[in-house]
């Protein structure tokens, strides 16, 4: 029987990063993966394919609507959807091969099949009619998450799709109905709207992007509406009639009331994701779950069974690839006897639309609720030189700092490249920096990042360009 120091079940960003870090620390490591390719949700049907389509569709829209005003004359761009899907697939393949390379480089064994925990120290891998059992000192569960489903609405991945189907539609729907105004709805809604679909988003709550700063979400909603998004807030889809040529969705106010019917060619259900623990044998092995079906862990990623750990989407916390990666590194270091740690106060979130939305730390609502006295510094991109010359002035930077200490508690950005701009705020916050620190840091000119510096200056009511 093969024997390891660590067996990681799942090769998403949590699992494969954990395996690499453990190998770096001298452990003999194997990963178990039931999918044909490595990389998990993120590389195969999540972050990476969605970003490829967001990029390609943004270029399509730019070519049609923005080139002419810059004096670049092109004939009306034509969509070649199979070629765009091929572009997406090339990106997936490249990244998946990259993970395979990392496994080889770090001498990590890849065991193909479904992993089942037979108890502390034993994992069974089965698939293709075969099964083998390996011994291991430690096990990390990194099995990720799956789509959440709506009762009574069956996802066929053709007309009623999850994000997976929405990443591979064969033609642009005339009308797309999206259930859920979260990250997936807004990102994939953007892709198909840019390619020509009429997009309507039905959201249960009375706002989009729950969890994000309220002011940011409100302004961002207006920007999306200008682009053509139609939002139906405080509403829910209760059924979808698939009998006709087009789908007919029944929509009801969240608080109850008269239902209305809406026609659509494609319905995208994106109402969140749920932890994935199927087939792992957790119950038999004695690994406890919490009341939301997530693997329960302590502050050191340890489950209720000694030597079995869990990380990523399958445990509590934001379902984000970088959170899974950081947990992967931390748990490998803990297993190696080091002090692995994740600072959950500084996990950025980005919505990769146009403009992008990024956020780190506390929102205004959270600070109010916690009774923390804070100061706000805001700076709009309309007053940022680089944004002005590029004529991409939508959005603003908002910095929330402790009223007494000036320590930065939260940074929220709507604007082009907001996902890149948030990183300096993350570094600042990791070091417990103040708005003054940020304001006194020299920022290259002309960059959009100068708006971050100006917002920090605005905390002290001394922005220069406003
Ligand atoms: P996963 O990536 O889900 O990987 C789990 C792996 O475990 C899978 O490969 C699965 O096959 C395998 N597995 C499960 N059970 C077993 C078993 N019993 N045996 C063997 N293998 C098993 N996050 C971001 O940070 N940025 C983004 O831009 C972003 N975009 C996204 C877009 C979409 C459309 C979706 C759906 C998600 C997106 N996410 C994004 C979220 C991100 O994909 C997840 O947070 C991340 O993949 C979680 O990583 P993980 O390692 O925990 O699990
Ligand atoms: P989400 O949690 O972001 O949004 C789901 C939305 O659906 C919420 O606004 C919720 O109020 C709404 N909703 C729930 N039930 C509903 C109902 N019955 N009717 C109408 N609306 C309903 O989940 P989403 O968009 O599915 O994404 C799943 C996960 O994937 C997220 O946790 C996210 O972190 C991750 N992800 C991250 C991305 C990024 O970082 N850029 C991109 C895409 C996904």
Image: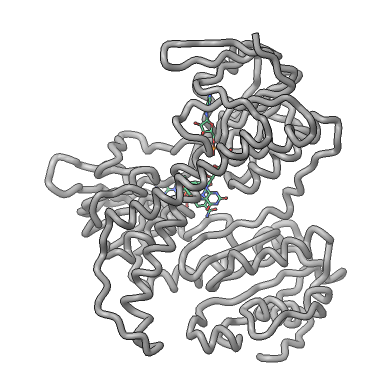
Residue at 21% across, 52% down: 265
The correct choice, above or below, for 383 with respect to 277 in the image is below
Instruction: Find residue 335 and report its horizontal and vertical position in percent.
Output: 79, 29
In terms of depth relative to the viewer, which is nearer, 125 or 425? Answer: 125
In terms of depth relative to the viewer, which is nearer, 38 or 231? Answer: 38
Instruction: Find residue 302 and report its horizontal and vertical position in percent.
Output: 74, 27
Q: In the rendered image, is residue 153 in sight?
A: no
- 46 displayed left or right of 60: right
Residue at 87% across, 69% down: 405
The correct choice, above or below, for 57 with respect to 163 in the image is below
Task: Report the residue that reaches farthest toward the top.
Answer: 1
Q: In the rendered image, is residue 249 in sight?
A: yes
Residue at 43% across, 63% down: 55
| Location of residue 80 (image quadrant) | bottom left
Quarter of the image for the C terminus: give it.
bottom right
The correct choice, above or below, for 425 with respect to 396 in the image is above
The color scheme shown is one colour
Instruction: Find residue 100 and report its horizontal and vertical position in percent.
Output: 56, 37
Quarter of the image for the N terminus: give it.
top right
- 128 displayed left or right of 196: right
Residue at 49% across, 26% down: 34
| Location of residue 202 (image quadrant) | bottom left
Counting labels gives 0
């Amino acid at each position: 029987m093969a024997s390891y120091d660590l067996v990681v079940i799942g090769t998403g960003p949590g699992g494969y990063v954990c395996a690499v870090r453990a190998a770096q620390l001298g452990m003999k490591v194997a990963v178990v993966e039931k999918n044909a390719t490595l990389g998990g949700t993120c590389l195969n049907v999540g972050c990476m394919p969605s970003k490829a389509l967001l990029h390609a569709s943004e270029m399509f829209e730019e070519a049609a609507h923005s080139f002419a005003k810059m004096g670049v004359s092109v004939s009306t761009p034509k969509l070649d959807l199979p070629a765009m899907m091929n572009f997406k697939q090339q990106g997936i393949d490249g990244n998946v091969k990259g993970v395979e390379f990392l496994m080889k480089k770090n001498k990590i064994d890849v065991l193909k099949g479904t992993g089942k925990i037979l108890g502390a120290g034993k994992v069974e891998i089965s698939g293709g009619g075969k099964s083998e059992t390996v011994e291991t000192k430690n096990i990390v569960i990194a099995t990720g998450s799956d789509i959440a489903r709506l009762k009574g609405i069956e996802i066929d991945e053709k007309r009623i799709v999850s994000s997976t189907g929405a990443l591979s539609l064969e033609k642009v729907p005339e009308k797309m109905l999206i259930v859920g105004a979260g990250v997936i709805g807004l990102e994939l809604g953007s892709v198909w709207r840019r390619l020509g679909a009429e997009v309507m988003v039905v959201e249960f709550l009375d706002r989009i992007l729950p969890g994000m700063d309220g002011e940011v979400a409100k302004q961002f909603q207006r920007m999306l509406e200008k682009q053509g998004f139609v939002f139906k807030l405080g509403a829910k889809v209760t059924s979808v009639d698939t009998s006709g040529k087009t789908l007919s969705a029944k929509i009801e106010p969240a608080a109850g009331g008269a239902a209305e019917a809406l026609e659509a060619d494609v319905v995208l259900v994106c109402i969140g994701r749920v932890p994935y623990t199927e087939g792992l044998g957790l119950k038999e092995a004695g690994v406890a779950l919490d009341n939301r079906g997530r693997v329960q862990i302590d502050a050191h990623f340890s489950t209720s069974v000694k030597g079995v750990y869990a990380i990523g989407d399958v445990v509590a916390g934001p379902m984000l690839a970088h959170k899974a990666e950081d947990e992967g590194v931390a748990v490998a270091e803990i297993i190696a006897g080091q002090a692995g740690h994740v600072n959950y106060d500084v996990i950025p979130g980005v919505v990769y639309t146009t403009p992008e939305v990024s956020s780190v730390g506390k929102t205004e609502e959270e600070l109010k609720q916690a009774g923390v006295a804070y100061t706000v510094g805001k700076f709009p991109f309309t007053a940022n030189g680089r944004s002005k010359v590029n004529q991409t002035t939508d959005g603003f930077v908002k910095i929330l700092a402790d009223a007494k200490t000036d320590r930065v508690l939260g940074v929220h950005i709507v604007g082009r490249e907001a996902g890149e701009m948030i990183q300096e705020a993350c570094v600042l916050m990791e070091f417990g920096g103040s708005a003054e620190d940020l304001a006194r840091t020299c920022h290259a000119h002309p960059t959009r990042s100068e708006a971050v510096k100006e917002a920090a200056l605005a905390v002290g009511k001394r922005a220069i360009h406003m």
